[in-house]
Structures are given as C-alpha cells and as structure tokens.
Amino acid sequence: MRFVTLIINKMKKLTILTIAILSIVSISCGEKQDQEKLEVKKADDKMMHAAHGLDVKVDNKFDPICGMETAGHVSDTINYQGKVYGFCNPGCKEEFAKNPEQYLSKLNPEH
C-alpha cells in the first residue's frame, strides 16, 4: 500500500510540473507573437508621399507640426498669408490647416 501511495504522489508532482512547464511555454509563445505583430509596419500613402521630397522654396525651416527640418523633406505645402509653408507629409499640412496661428507662433514667437 505504501508503494502505491509513493507512486501516486510522484505522479501528482509530475503532473503539476508538466502543467507548469506547459503554462510557461504557452505564455512565452504568446508574448513572442505579440512582439512580432508590433514590429511589422507597412507604409501607407502618406508615408510613401513623404519619401518623395518636393523641390520648392518654403518660408519655414522646420515643419511646424512635427519639428522635422524641411530642407530636402518637403512633400506638401500650403499658402497662408502670402507665404508658402512646407510640411514633411500631408498629415502635418492638414493639422496646420486646422489652426495655422497656433502653429505659426511655434515657428516665430513674435508672430
């Protein structure tokens, strides 16, 4: 009888150990899949458009929305109060168009 009890106890320990190992492996694999999902990025139309700079002269040295230098990186422009402002992508231009005065004050504190 004592022998059977020892075997049952060993089987319980083995079962608990197996469940613990499978749980750790399962959690570990789940985290790895989440990381892989985060690392994959696809370029959208705005990003692709931003990669092709326009050859235009603009009145601002930096994109007023994101702060990116405009030299060689202008992909969109807007005319505002007789000046041409350059942006690194159409999204920044759209944001600027919502409230130009707010962003112009960042470019020129005296404005």
Image (cartoon, rainbow, N blue to C red):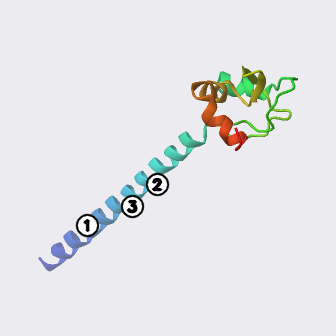
State the residue position of label 2: 28
- Residue nearest the observer in this picture, 79 or 62: 79
Report whether residue 41 is seen: no
Residue 69, relative to residue 43: is it above or below?
below
Sequence order check, earlier mark of 3 and 2:
3
> Please, what is the three-letter code of the amino acid marked with disc 3?
Ile
Q: Is residue 12 left or right of residue 102?
A: left
State the residue position of label 1: 11
Q: Is residue 6 left or right of residue 55?
A: left
* Secondary structure state at the residue bearing disc 1: helix
In percent of the image, x 73 and y 23: which residue is there?
A: 49
Real-space CA distance between mark 3 and mark 1, rounded to the nearest whole angstrom: 15 Å
- Residue nearest the observer in this picture, 14 or 109: 109
Q: Is residue 45 left or right of residue 21?
A: right
Rendered location of residue 13, percent (x, y)? 27, 69
State the residue position of label 3: 21
Mark 3 surroundings within 10 Å by alpha-carbon count, few (fewer than 14), some (14 through 19), many (20 or more): few
Specify the label residue 46 is tagged with. none
Sequence order check, earlier mark of 1 and 2:
1
